[in-house]
Amino acid sequence: MTLDITLKHRFGDFALDVAFRAPAGVTALFGPSGSGKTTVIHAVAGLIRPDQGRISVGGVAVLDTAAGHALPPHRRRIGYVFQDARLFPHLTVRQNLLYGRWFAPKGSGPGLDRIVEMLGIGPLLARRPGALSGGERQRVAIGRAILSNPRLLALDEPLAALDDPRKAEILPYLERLRDDLGLPMLYVSHAMTEVARLADTVVLMAAGRVTAAGPAAEILSDPAIAPGLGLREAGAILTARVVEHSADGLTLLDSAAGPLWLPRVAAAPGARLRIRVLAQDVMLATERPAGISALNILPAILRDIRIGDGPGAMVRLEAGGEVLLARITRRSANALVLEPGKPVFAILKAVSVAQENVGAGE
Amino acid sequence: MTDWLTPDEWRAVALSLRVSFWATLASLPLGLLVAYALARWNFWGKQLLNGLVHLPLILPPVVTGYLLLVTFGRRGAVGQVLDHWFGIVLAFRWTGAALAAAVMAFPLMVRAMRLAIEAVDPRLEQAASTLGASRPMVFLTVTLPLILPGIIAGTILAFAKAMGEFGATITFVSNIPGQTETLPSAIYALLQVPGGEGPASRLVWVAILIAMAALLVSEWVARGVARRVSGQ
């Protein structure tokens, strides 16, 4: 199921002009506020009528202004999760969840029990929305959208209104939905943590335009793009498998880049993980360092170095087929005579990988 | 149990209840439509409609009654047509009393409903549409349940107003015992004859009781609905 979007829209002095294709899986629309991502997702769901454009979901056009065709929102079958859950206050959680069932094609899509179990909202079914916490509300809203049996799930900054513990509570549920249901998702966010954990494809937006689009691992570790995401947010994504938990509170992982020690990860041995390694947490050495406290020393080849306007430089490394980003100073780059093709060692402190940057991977 | 009111007095009470019931019931759908239009739609002449709806609230009731007589009387523009084509006569009939009561109560009904509709978050309706509900289904399953307290409040208010309507009614349909003599008209008529204060005071008590009962019921129902609607 692919989503094809071409849109031109203008309101006030803001002009939106985008075109991109979202393949199956989770596509993240990432950009600062005011970049136009919400306009795009609204247009996809039919909540606004763009001046010009064509949107098709799995080859079926839901909007084609040239042909004067625009399906109303209720006939698009695009589940929408709003930033504010928007649960119906007069209905119980169960009734909220089943609301879309009245209108969905009969006998298809996941059942109530399965979604309730996946989202962990069983104990809430008899309650009313007013008696739920923010995180619970958002989980119910996600379940409600999925149970309307949509062809695409559109999530409009679903975690932005929640505090960090709540976000951390919901992210694993979203990962489960991604991995177990295979429902295509369009995920709008301005938080790199969420994008890095969830997205298969990333579409970067700025000032009403698409600045880059492609597979998440490639886009996020492209040194030409990474600084634009915010220097502190730049980082590469590694996939790894849990090998064992050790008695001293660490977990050993196996990745293509080499073995990794991280603080205890809440996943069973054998589980696949997706780890975001921030560029600012990676140190470089030209010789294997000895007598160092950092636990992870990965041999790598320097592929690309990009000098910034300031004192910094973004370095892209290749380690066993995986890409790593390192942010170092220009001075260090000169001192170590770094250039493409040079073998180096990437050094990563185990404790520098925050819990929120470790998620489930498929 | 029934002998503390004379048959004539009972007739007045029963007539008032009947007139108010039908006046309220018949204006309910129109009231909801007008309230919805005023709350949600932008159309040419919106302020005019708003003014027209509220006019009976500020006009002297006798003027409203006169206008009804001129329009719906046997020789009135609309009355003639109704009589000729449908055999419906409103002037000096209980149906006319119901029409007068409905017109007088209409602004109160519309106001209460309009406030309730304006308080509904349109973003909830938007959410319902993304879940597959068409516009009419959104109204039935989201908007209507959420404005139910307002509808109930407006209906009871209109009923109470209809029960008490006097000026426009007596001008439009006079007070013919058993035909158009409603509770207020009966009280007024009794007070015009010597020694009528006794029977009048009994009717006054009936009027107070009915009004109080209506208020209490509406409070009770609206509170229950409001609790449900607020999501608690």
Image: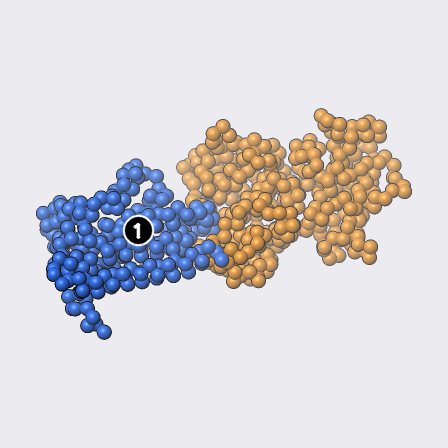
Chain colours: A orange, B blue
Residue A13, x across and y down, in percent: 49, 28
Q: Is A174 or A164 nearer to us in this picture?
A: A164
Q: Kindly identify the residue that appears in the image at 72 percent across and 55 percent down.
A: A266
Q: Quadrant of the N terminus of chain B?
A: bottom left
Vertical comparison of B185 with A257: above or below? below
Residue A254, x across and y down, in percent: 78, 50
Kind of element beneath mark 1: helix
Q: Kindly identify the residue that appears in the image at 53 percent across and 52 percent down.
A: A141
Vertical comparison of A67 with A307: above or below? below
A358 relative position to A248: left or right: left
- Residue A56 in view here: no
Read off the chain for label 1: B
Query: Residue B222, located in which quarter of the rendered image?
Result: bottom left
Q: Is A223 or B220 nearer to us in this picture?
A: B220
A337 relative position to B11: left or right: right
| Residue type at numbered disc 1 | Met
Residue B211, x across and y down, in percent: 29, 59
Q: Residue furthest front?
A: B195
Q: Is B19 or B141 nearer to us in this picture?
A: B19
Residue labelled with disc 1: B109
Residue A337, x across and y down, in percent: 83, 28
Q: Residue furthest bottom?
A: B1
Query: Residue A313, located in which quarter of the rendered image?
Result: top right
Q: Kindly identify the residue that appears in the image at 49 percent across and 32 percent down.
A: A8
Q: Kindly identify the residue that appears in the image at 82 percent across and 30 percent down.
A: A332
Q: Residue furthest top?
A: A309
B35 relative position to A294: left or right: left
**Mark 1 Cα-neighbour bin, 10 Å: few <14, some 14–19, many ≥20:** many
